[in-house]
Image (cartoon, rainbow, N blue to C red):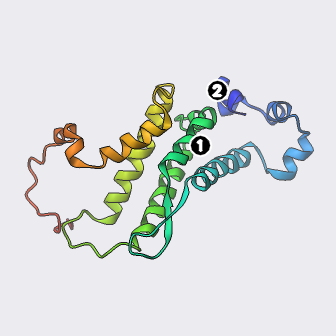
Amino acid sequence: MSTLLQQNSLKQISVQKLTQTAQITRGTFYLHYKDKVDFLEQTEQQVIDEWFAAAKTTLTPQGEPTRGFALGPALRYVDQHHQILLVLLHPQFTQFQPRLLQRFEREMTAYAQHLPTPDGEQPPLDVQTAFLATAFTGLVHHWLNDNRRYRSEFLAQSFCQLLKPEVTPVAAWFAPVGIDLPIGAEKA
C-alpha cells in the first residue's frame, strides 16, 4: 500500500488498485472496510497502535508502575516502517498527524498522573505535552525526510539530550523578551 500511496494521491487510488496490490478480492476488502476512506482510517489507527505497542515500557516515577514510551524501540519501529510512516505524515493525509499527536498527549497526560504535584514553577501540563508531542513527531518527520541519516539509537539519545536546556544552547534563540507575567499567571 505504501508504494501505491507514494506514487499516487489517495484520490487517484481506486478500491480495485488497492485489492490488486494487496492481492485480495473486492469482496474480502468490503468484508473488512466500508470504503477506501475507512481503509485509510483503520490503517492509520493500526500504525499508531503498533507504534505505541512497540514502544511500550513500564516506568516507576513514584514507585508505582505506569506505562512509558521507550525511545529505542519506538524509533526502531519507525525505521522498520519508514515507508508507510513517510506516506502517512504527508500533508494529503490530514487526519494522521492530529491523531498521532492526540495519542502522544493522552499517553503523557496519563503518565503525569503518577508524578508528584508540580510546585507552580512548571508550565501547564497541556503546554508540556503539546511541546513534547510536536517536538518528537517533528523530529521523526525530519529524520524520515532526511532519509534516516542517523541510526535510530543515536536519534533517541539526541532527543533525550535535547530535553535538557543546558545541552541545547540554540534554544536561547527563543528569547524571553516581552514576557512580563510569571509562569503561574497563565489566564488571559
The residue at the point 26 percent across, 72 percent down is 118
Q: Horizontal placement of 168 versus 137: left or right?
A: left
The quarter in which the N terminus is drawn is top right
115 shown above or below 75: below
The residue at the point 50 percent across, 53 percent down is 70
Q: What x and y, as percent, mark residue 63?
A: 42, 75
**In front: 125, or 40?**
125
Q: Which residue is mark 1?
A: 77
90 shown above or below 33: above
SS for callout 2: helix
The quadrant in which residue 24 appears is: top right
Three-letter code for the amino acid on which mark 1 is drawn:
Tyr
30 shown above or below 122: above
**In front: 171, or 156?**
156
Three-letter code for the amino acid on which mark 2 is drawn:
Gln
The quarter in which the C terminus is drawn is bottom left
